[in-house]
Image (cartoon, rainbow, N blue to C red):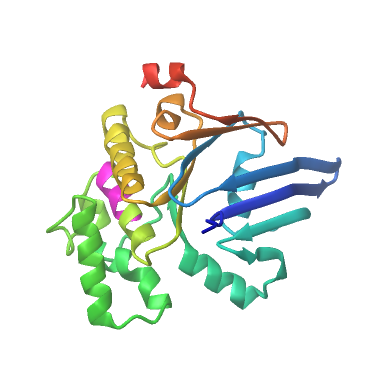
Amino acid sequence: MVIAPVIECRRLVKDYVTDAGTLHVLQGIDLKVMPGEFVAIMGPSGSGKSTLMNILGCLDVPTAGQYVLAGADVGTLSEPALAQLRNQTIGFVFQGYNLLGRATLEDNVALPLVYAKVAAVDRRARARELLAKVGLDGYAGSFPSKISGGQQQRVAIARALVTRPALVLADEPTGNLDTHTSVEIMQLFSALNRDGMTLVVVTHEPDVAAWAGRLVQLRDGVVNYDGPVPEQFRKAS
């Protein structure tokens, strides 16, 4: 049985036209991510990693090349079909949590299920299940302002998982957290990966990348390294 990649990028190019001329951000990216992998994407400012993450998340489209997500050629999809694929296939975790301040933690986690038209009783049950999974059992009725930053990021991770996605994309998920809390969040990601979740994390921190099984480094819009996480990253974490 042949196992298909969750992510397959073929010669991805992304250009932006500016007043100063054309900016070549991605210059032919080839990338495959298989089910169950934990991949860290690193690179200096301007390397193209945020642009690549936006394309992987179907939040932007390449200028040229092909992106296949969970077997679907993204470039051939209508906007409604693309939105459906994104909502069903990808869970997003952002640096800034992006929680709704006036909604309970349960309602924040359940929000993607509202768009998926899941019945209210099932939404509540699934949200509470995920809050327990990320270590926040008993917090369903709390509000984001009443919990710590690390707990807010756990809520964001629960929300990312609530639709049972094939892939979680995390953009600098520990960027607003202290060292101890960052370790706790990465331990949670590692546990999710051991359970079979496919994870792609964009980070500039070697100690965050050290938790991954594979490192992809970008420089000037191209992949200049794709392989095991260097041992010095692990020793520093």
Residue 142 lies in quadrant: bottom left
Q: What percent of the width, then of the height, locates residue 31?
A: 63, 44
Question: How far across and down, in percent of the image, does residue 205 sit?
Answer: 46, 28
* Residue numbers of the magenta segment: 150-156
Would you say residue 212 is visible in this rendering?
A: yes
Q: Name the foreground residue: 98 vs 134.
A: 134
Q: Residue at x 14, y 56 (%)?
A: 137
Horizontal side, residue 70 vs residue 134: left or right: right
Q: Position of residue 198 (x, y in %)?
A: 44, 50
Is 141 left or right of 108, judged from the image as shown? left
Verify whether residue 121 appears in magenta.
no
Residue 62 makes an appearance in the image = no
Count of marks placed on residues: 0
139 versus 33 height, above or below: below
Residue at 29% over, 49% down: 154
**Whether residue 141 is situated above or below residue 207 in the rendered picture:** below
The residue sitting at 36% across, 70% down in the picture is 111
Query: Considering the image in quadrants, where does the C terminus appear?
Result: top left
| Residue found at x 38% / y 17% | 236
Q: Where's residue 136, x and y in %? A: 18, 53
Outermost residue, left side: 138
Q: Nearer the viewer, residue 201 or 108?
A: 201
Q: Main secondary structure of the magenta part?
A: helix
> Splitting the image into 4 quarters, where does residue 110 fall?
bottom left
Going by the picture, which residue comes out furthest to the front? 1
Instruction: Determine the residue located farthest toward the right in the rendered image.
Output: 21
> Which of 44 and 65 lies nearest the eye of the viewer?
65
